[in-house]
Image: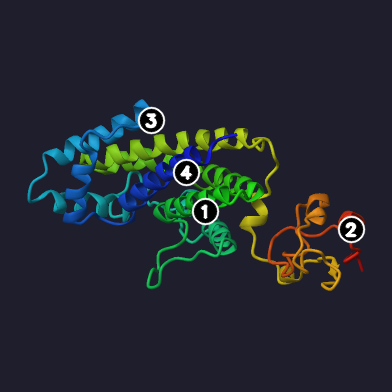
Amino acid sequence: MIGKEEFRRTQEQRVAVYSLIARLFEKPLNQDEIDLLAVGLEGAECMNAEMQHGLGVMGHYLRKRNSGTREVLNRDYTSAFYGIQDIDGRYALPYESAFEKPNQLIMGEGRRKVFNIYKKQALRLRDAIDVPEDHLSYMCEFMSVMAERSVKAFESDATEEVKESLLLQRAFLTAHVLSWYDEFSKLAEQLVEERFYRGALEFSGAFFKLDKDVIKSQLVDLGAAHEKFDLAWWEAPRATDERHAYRPALEKSLCIRKKGGLCDKCTEACPMHIDPVLDRSGATRVECTKCGKCVEACPAGALSID
């Protein structure tokens, strides 16, 4: 079993890289960010050769920065990622939906799916932002937030929560980032003029592929590498009756835990891992199957199935 310190350190590294990529592709860099990035890239080391090469290209470019670097990078970003220039009618728009169909229309199916995932994780874009949710930078922010939440769950020994978080991250990365990033990157490399963004594209693509392996390794360690995961549920709108997911009836006056005692036999017995004492709102996605295992396991007879 992976230790808490090692798990935390790995997630912190993932958060740092995802945050960096999110900023690189969100909008043009300002002068302070360019200066900080130049210092941060000095002597930085990565986990594989492709990432290292991309980082090296970025660092080498910024070492030679001058008073006009910001304007040059601004022009390069705007030309490529805002869709000012094209290659044979194709644009390097950093949106998943822009690569779903030949017409490259944004606000498509990809946007709808990631919006529903964010919503079910109680996340939303910052106020005053009117850019679609399937922008690459927002996807990276999502992965960063999920990595942070994984640490909190791991430190609380909430193993099932950690597993579900990692399974969601792996599925999201595969279906909503890796599925289109290579096409986007190859197109963008032809449109940008400065080596800085070519390095950023190479670095980011290499990291996404590496991170999928990192998540898989952690799932293996947790014994969940081959567990089935219903990504389609996360991508779909929340059902109107989901708040009313069934839970066994609880007689609080009989429940050992509600009276201050220690007992979790009902949760241990539940094949769906529902805690019928604490999980009363039905806000989670797991629906009670009414198997009666918790009723049979309760030593106080506090639970019943209608």
**Camera-nearest label, 1 or 2:** 2
Q: What is the number of the mark on residue 149?
A: 1
Local SS, label 1 = helix
The residue at 44%/62% (across/down) is 132
Name the residue that disc number 4 marks: 8
Would you say the residues marked 1 and 4 are in contact, meaning their CB atoms lie under 8 Å apart? Answer: no
Residue 208, picture quadrant: top left
Local SS, label 3 = loop
Front residue of 213/279: it is 279
Q: What is the number of the mark on residue 1?
A: none
The crowd level at tag 4 (other Cα within 10 Å; few <14, some 14-19, many 20+) is some
Specify whether residue 101 is in view: no
Q: Which amino acid does label 2 sit on?
A: Pro
Q: Alpha-carbon distance for marks 3 and 4?
A: 17 Å
Q: Where is residue 214 in the image (x, y as percent from the top left)?
A: 50, 35
Name the residue that disc number 2 marks: 299
Q: Where is residue 170 in the image (x, y as percent from the top left)?
A: 56, 43
Front residue of 14/59: it is 14
Name the residue that disc number 3 marks: 47
Q: Alpha-carbon distance for marks 3 and 1?
A: 23 Å
